[in-house]
Image (spheres, grey):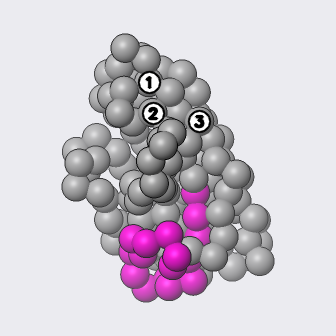
Amino acid sequence: QVQLVESGGGLVQVGGSLRLSCAASGRTFSSYAMGWFRQAPGKEREIVAAIRSSGDNTYYANSLKDRFTLSRDNAKNLVYLQMNSLKPEDTAVYYCAASPTSWRTPREAYEYDYWGQGTQVTVSS
């Protein structure tokens, strides 16, 4: 069982930055691939980025690769999503998730077993 708690969301102006954190409970955090998803009002949940359990491989949605950076600290049971040059279209609830397919960077929501409650990111123009 893994419990996930996101933090770091908030209101930011266009072009600003935010760093989201995801704190995981449980001793087996390092055996899970981790991902961030987001869901904007009226839209489906979409993958933002994913990282393998070892932290040595990451995946980003094509449109986000140049602005977002995903990292993890297995010693602290933390995952970070650094978001730079934020745009109004980045406004969404951001969710952290854990997947048992540790050797991959899972890109589909169904591949994740555990989810956080979400944190709101609002980018104002």
**Nearest the eye: 71 or 8:** 8
Residue furthest front in the image: 42
Q: Are marks 1 and 2 in contact (CB under 8 Å)?
A: yes
The Cα atoms of the two marked residues, 1 and 2, are separated by 5 Å
Of residues 50 and 39, the one drawn nearer to the viewer in this rendering: 39
Q: Amino acid at mark 1?
A: Val
| Residue 54, above or below 123 | below
Q: What x and y, as percent, mark residue 112?
A: 56, 74
Please, what is the three-letter code of the amino acid marked with disc 3? Gln
User: Residue 77 is drawn in which quadrant?
Assistant: bottom right
| Percent of width and height locating residue 58 | 34, 66
Q: How many angstroms separate mark 3 from mark 2 (CA)? A: 8 Å
- Please give the range of residues in magenta: 96-111
Q: Is residue 22 left or right of residue 89?
A: right
**Whether residue 4 can be seen here:** yes
Foreground residue, 110 or 77? Answer: 110
The dot on residue 120 is 3
Question: What residue do we see at 70% from left, 51% from top?
Answer: 117
Above or below, 111 against 25 in this view is below
Secondary structure of residue under mark 2: loop
**Amino acid type assigned to the residue bearing label 2 in the image:** Thr
